[in-house]
Image (cartoon, grey):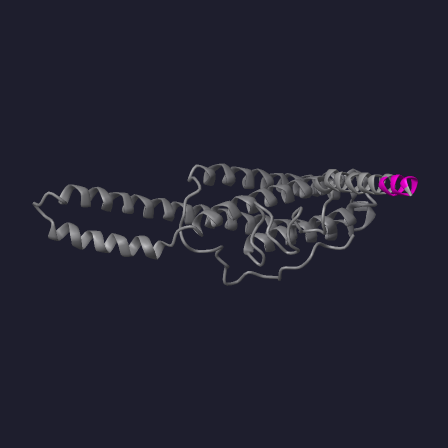
Amino acid sequence: MLVAAVVLLVVLLVAAALLLAVVLLRRRIAPSTSGPAGTPLGGRPGAQRPGAPALGSPAQAWVERGERIAVRLRELVGPYPALTGAADDADAVVTELRAAAGEVAALDAARARLAVSTLEAEQERLGVALARAAGQPAEDDLRIALDAVVARLGLAARNRAAVDALLARMRAAVAGMERTLDELAALLAAPTGAATAVTAATTELTDRLSGFREGLAEVRTITGRAGVTDIGQGQGLPGDLPGSVEGPPRT
């Protein structure tokens, strides 16, 4: 009877040790396990990644269009090793598009914490109160409060201008990439005797793509000086935004 009890105890201890080992192993593996595309680690499917553009926003649309163009361009120049530089430059433009979209997301996240209408209403109330307190002890404090609200509204306006500048530059870069793709396709369809002209034109297209990349980097630097401030609207949607938000292109 005693032997049976000892055996049972040993079995229970072994089972407990194995269970503990499994738990520890799962905890060790969990941080390095990624979920489905677009799902943060340990998060819900479809949750927003920090720094990612808002779903359905212009920033997301421009990035996805740029990615599709870059894939098509690389497929186009695949048979021509001498032209891979153009595809590399297109990939570099997409990298800048993603960085610009991240900055738009950061600016929008900051704006979401404060509604401009709230500041404007406060500015109006303080203006009325200041007029009534003329010559009274409260006048100086009310003026300080009003100046602070006016300053915050000014920061909000610069924040909005920074977002608009980033989105406009992203739009221009994507439109330019599409033009480059079309022109390169036309050049490669030309007679083989025009090889010299194709090479010269491809160099021009590559320079153009480099210009888009540098332009995006420049506008990101400029808008970064505006700081991340709060103004209470989401990402603006250009009225004539072409295309739709689609999933990643199939390769």
Near-viewer residue (146 or 68): 146
Q: Is residue 23 above or below residue 44?
A: above
Q: Is residue 57 above or below residue 51?
A: below
Query: Within the magenta stretch, is there residue 231?
Result: no
Near-viewer residue (179 or 247): 247
Of helix, strand and loop, which mostly describes the magenta segment?
Answer: helix
Residue 30 rendering spot, x and y as whole percentages: 72, 42
Near-viewer residue (132 or 98): 132
Query: Within the magenta stretch, is there residue 8?
Result: yes
Which region of the structure is painted magenta? 2-9
The residue at the point 61 percent across, 54 percent down is 47
The part of the image, by quadrant, that contains residue 155 is top left
> Going by the image, does 40 lie left or right of 186?
left
The part of the image, by quadrant, that contains residue 18 is top right
> Going by the image, does 84 lie left or right of 216?
right
The part of the image, by quadrant, that contains residue 139 is top left
Residue furthest toward the left?
A: 135
Residue 145 rendering spot, x and y as whole percentages: 24, 44
